[in-house]
């Protein structure tokens, strides 16, 4: 009886790695409350089934971001040594979760569950993980095209998965493009708001070529005598944000009412952040721009009216970045190699 068993037992595959669905939802709810108060508020406008699935997906995104940056729910960056190993761990845990195997991490188990329920694919997950990989590599955009690709990986690709979770067909390219536009808009608002914080963490997401045009020397982006030039760059990014935001509204018009309301509320809140940065100009980084709870509730109310009316204005021009073009580049060229440290264009 003490002899080793000759029967090889395999781990059974189960959605969520065998965890109870309600337990995973509770964990995901806690994660979104701690990680993003704006998105947590907007997410409560979904119908309960969609809301739970959105939370499950968010928990995975938040956990991957925290693992990649060695932080806790978007807090201060930890020691960055070993970033490549952490990205490898993210890929392995994600693959295991999608196979229905337990991961010992509820956020990854949550992703396995929602991926199974909604038909999220490994390719979708990999598109998002590549964004974490770019940050782990210390990558910085040289051109606007580089920035477009980064924004796709860290936000546009998330928007695509969120759309599928909301019930959009994976074959509906137009709707997925609009979801990607919403992700672009969110990320551009985040970038202009967080320039100072990113600079302190030795990160930069402003295209180097734009900085050269404005005569901002490498490493001097937050220097006081460059505040007007920085404000000019921010205004360019917000103009792009607004064009993507307008097209995202066209997509929201085709969603069920509760999903439309939630999407429009989030778009209004993040859009307000970007427009406030533009309004403040050179003083936008004196303190972090935030939208208070009262302001958020006003945007939720305005989004309700907009969702009921459901007559978005047709944008005059297409958005500057297109998911299809970026995807072709991603599929053909693979990961972007890290550039030399802050080279100046010839």
Image (tube, rainbow, N blue to C red):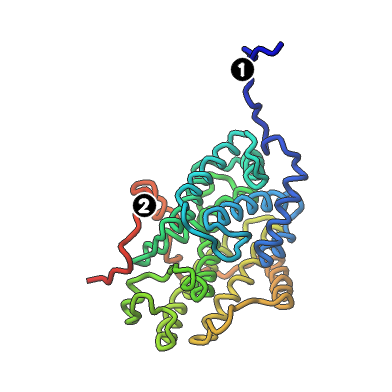
Q: Pick out the residue farthest to the left.
A: 346
Q: Position of residue 192 (x, y in %)?
A: 50, 74
Q: Would you call the spot at circle 1 few (<14 residues within 10 Å), some (14-19), or many (20 or more)? A: few
Answer left or right for 129 relative to 293: left
Answer left or right for 109 relative to 130: right
Along the viewing direction, whichever of 3 and 308 lies nearer the viewer: 3
Q: Position of residue 190 (x, y in %)?
A: 54, 69
Q: Are marks 2 and 1 in contact (CB under 8 Å)?
A: no
Along the viewing direction, whichever of 213 and 72 lies nearer the viewer: 72
Vertical side of 316 occupied by 133: above or below = above
Along the viewing direction, whichever of 222 and 124 lies nearer the viewer: 222
Q: Would you call the spot at circle 2 few (<14 residues within 10 Å), some (14-19), or many (20 or more)? A: few
Quarter of the figure with residue 20: top right
In front: label 2 or label 1: 1
Number of numbered discs visible in the structure rendering: 2
Q: Quadrant of the N terminus?
A: top right
Vertical side of 186 occupied by 285: above or below = below
Label 2, label 1: how many angstroms apart (C-alpha)?
A: 45 Å
Name which of mark 2 and mark 1 comes first in the sequence.
1
Task: State the residue position of label 2.
Answer: 329
Secondary structure at badge 1 equals: loop
Q: Position of residue 320 (x, y in %)?
A: 42, 66
Determine the residue positioned at 34% across, 66% down.
142
Vertical side of 322 occupied by 278: above or below = below
Task: State the residue position of label 1.
Answer: 8
Q: Position of residue 156 (x, y in %)?
A: 51, 57
Secondary structure at badge 2 equals: helix
Q: Quadrant of the C terminus?
A: bottom left
Vertical side of 87 occupied by 71: above or below = below
Determine the residue positioned at 42% across, 84% down.
223
Q: Pick out the residue farthest to the bottom.
A: 225
């Amino acid at each position: 009886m003490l002899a080793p068993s000759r029967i090889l037992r395999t781990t059974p595959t189960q959605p969520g790695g065998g965890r109870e669905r309600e337990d995973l939802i509770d964990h995901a709810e806690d994660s979104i409350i701690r990680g993003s108060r704006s998105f947590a508020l907007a997410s409560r406008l979904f119908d309960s089934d969609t809301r739970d699935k959105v939370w499950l997906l968010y928990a995975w995104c938040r956990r991957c971001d925290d693992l990649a940056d060695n932080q806790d729910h978007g807090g201060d960056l930890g020691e960055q040594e070993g970033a490549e190993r952490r990205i490898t761990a993210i890929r392995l845990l994600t693959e295991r979760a999608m196979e229905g195997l337990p991961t010992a991490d509820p956020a990854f188990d949550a992703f396995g569950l929602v991926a199974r329920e909604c038909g999220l694919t490994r390719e979708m997950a990999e598109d998002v993980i590549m964004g974490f990989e770019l940050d782990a590599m210390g990558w910085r955009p040289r051109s606007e095209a580089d920035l477009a690709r980064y924004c796709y990986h860290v936000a546009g690709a998330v928007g695509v998965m969120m759309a599928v979770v909301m019930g959009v067909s994976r074959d509906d390219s137009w709707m997925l493009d609009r979801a990607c536009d919403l992700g672009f808009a969110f990320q551009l608002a985040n970038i202009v708001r967080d320039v100072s914080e990113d600079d302190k963490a030795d990160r930069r997401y402003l295209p180097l070529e734009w900085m050269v045009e404005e005569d901002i020397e490498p490493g001097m982006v937050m220097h006081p005598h460059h505040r007007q030039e920085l404000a000019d760059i921010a205004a360019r990014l917000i103009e792009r944000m607004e064009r993507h935001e307008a097209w995202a509204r066209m997509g929201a018009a085709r969603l069920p009412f509760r999903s439309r309301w939630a999407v429009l509320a989030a778009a209004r809140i993040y859009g307000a952040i970007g427009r406030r940065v533009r309004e403040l100009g050179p003083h936008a980084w004196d303190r972090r721009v935030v939208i208070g709870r009262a302001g958020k509730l006003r945007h939720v109310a305005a989004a309700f009216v907009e969702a009921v009316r459901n007559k978005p204005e047709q944008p005059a021009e297409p958005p500057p970045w297109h998911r299809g073009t970026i995807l072709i580049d991603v599929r053909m060229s693979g990961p972007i190699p890290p550039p030399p440290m802050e080279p100046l264009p010839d």
